[in-house]
Amino acid sequence: MRSSRAVVETRRNRLLKSLYESGAVNIQEIAGEMGVSPLTVRRDLLKLEEVEKITRFYGGASLGKNAGAEEGNIFSSAFTLNKTAIARYAAALVEDGDTIFINTSSTAAGMIPFITAKHVTVITNNARAMEAERPKDMILIFTGGEMRFPKEAMVGDFAVNNLSTVTASKCFLGCNGLTAREGLTTAMMQEASVNHLMLTRVTGPRYILADKSKIGRRLNFIYGSLGEITMLITDTEAPPEMVEELRQRIEVYQVEPLSTL
């Protein structure tokens, strides 16, 4: 029996959501997560490539130039601009000579091109940070470790052991979810221990960067508590009741989406 149009659209939106959150997907992995065949995923990706929403490569796909074409969609350009506004504000908090931790969050990694402070050292487990535009005097250090796709996250004992030998003056971390009750959560078990080390091996402020989609959301693996957060940086479109609940416990700064600046 052929899938209905609604089922197909729902599945393709799930694919786009995974791409938006991770930047790229592996066909075999996403097929397993969605409970469909790799052939079905390939067909969906082919259709999405035809409208330039994604770019296919061997074994997977990444976001295309029209990924945010629909007005009001979670993958819309306005939504990505929320993350860019958060990243730009966070970058201004970096000072000359800082050593900072950045995790695999696309919002946190998005800070790098906006950092204007001099002689900054960035320690990250995000392999995609290598592709970011950055100041010539910035030192980029990777934790190393087992590479997990599609996020290109460096995790495992090697990454944990390396992080255990260093400290940073600040950290700028993203999360998959943040609630007043559970704190910081992530979807990938292997990232939890790395994120926790980045959160705790800091001598100064601990900043959490989370756009509206993360606030009030809870994922499976907790990596930090509200008591470990110095400031949450989110956008003005985050759920007001959730933000207010968090504001009772931690400092919250909200930025205007770039589209309204």
Image: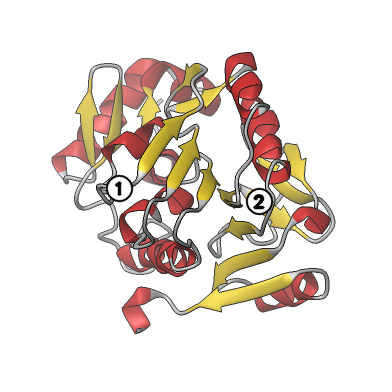
| Tag 2 residue | 177
CB atoms of marks 2 and 1 within 8 Å: no
Give percent across and percent down for residue 160.
64, 23
Which amino acid, mark 2? Gly
Q: From the viewer's perspective, is 181 left or right of 211?
A: right
Residue 168 position (above or below residue 148): below
Q: Nearer the viewer, mark 2 or mark 1?
A: 1
- Snapshot quadrant of residue 168: top right
Residue 177 position (above or below residue 259): above
Q: CA distance from mark 2 to mark 1?
A: 33 Å
Give percent across and percent down for residue 181.
84, 57
Q: From the viewer's perspective, is 250 left or right of 79?
A: right
Name the mark on residue 137: 1
Q: From the viewer's perspective, is 159 left or right of 4?
A: right
Residue visible at 36% across and 66% down in the picture: 81
Secondary structure type for disc 1: loop
